[in-house]
Structures are given as C-alpha cells and as structure tokens.
Amino acid sequence: GTLIGPVLGAGLIKYFENIFSKINSNLLHKWFSFLPDGLEDFVVTIIYPFIGKGWHLTLGLMFMGVIIFLPGGLVELGQRISRSFSKNKNDAAEHKPAE
C-alpha cells in the first residue's frame, strides 16, 4: 500500500461531507425544476434522505462502491486511468497505415 491513499481518502471524505451536508430540499427543488411538478417532487423525495442530515448514508454507499469496484482504492483508480492513456499512445505508435 501507499501512504497517499489514506491521506487522499480522508481529504475526499471531508470534502464530500461539506458538499452533501449543505444540500437541502430547496436546493434540490431548484436543481430539478426543469421536470414536471409531480416528477420533481418524486425525485426530491427519493434523493433527500441521501443528503443534508443523511449525508452519512451517501458516504457509506460511496465507501462500498470503492471497496467493491476498486479494492486497491483511489490510487488504483489513478493508476488504471494513467495506464489506459499510456496504452492508447503506444497502440497508436505501433499501428502503421497500409501502403
């Protein structure tokens, strides 16, 4: 493992805590105002338990997602992304047009 992973994780937890805890139902209604009224109320009712005072639930779901899909953590995600970009560059260099 690395030391940067836990530091990055702790920083992201505090960042998302600030974001999710400040969202309230008025802001949700403003975000989804483009929807018809009945659908807007339904979407806000579904999303509201995951934000505001319920931000712990959202953070728990995010933790579960990282643990299930990225056992190596967020550092592994960064490594996967960098490898995918470096593979694309190498593949492009190896393929030559037919003459």
Image (cartoon, rainbow, N blue to C red):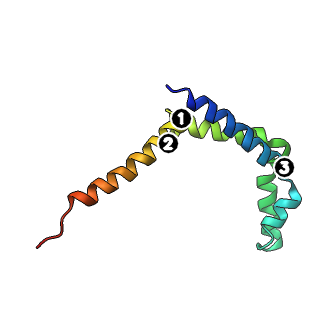
Which residue is disc 3 drawn over? 22
Whether label 3 touches label 2, CB < 8 Å = no
Task: Determine whether the residue tagged by mark 3 lies in a helix, strand or loop.
Answer: helix
For image coordinates 83% across by 52% down, the residue present is: 23
Where's residue 4, x and y in %?
56, 31
Kindly identify the residue that appears in the image at 68 percent across and 33 percent down. 10
Q: Which residue is mark 1?
A: 73
Secondary element type, mark 2 = helix
**Is 37 on the left or on the right of 80, as rendered?**
right
Measure the C-alpha gap from mark 3 to mark 2: 28 Å
Q: Amino acid at mark 3?
A: Lys
Place residue 14 in its image quadrant: top right
Q: Label 1: state its secondary structure.
A: loop
Between residue 18 and residue 37, name the one nearer to us.
18
Sequence-wise, the earlier of marks 3 and 2 is: 3
Q: Which residue is mark 2?
A: 77
- Kindly indicate the quadrant of the structure image that contains residue 96: bottom left
Q: CA distance from mark 2 to mark 1?
A: 7 Å
Query: Which tag, 1 or 3, sits closer to the chain's start?
Result: 3
Residues under numbered marks 1 and 3 in contact, where contact means CB atoms less than 8 Å apart: no
Question: Which residue occupies 49% across, 25% down?
Answer: 1
Label drawn at residue 44? none
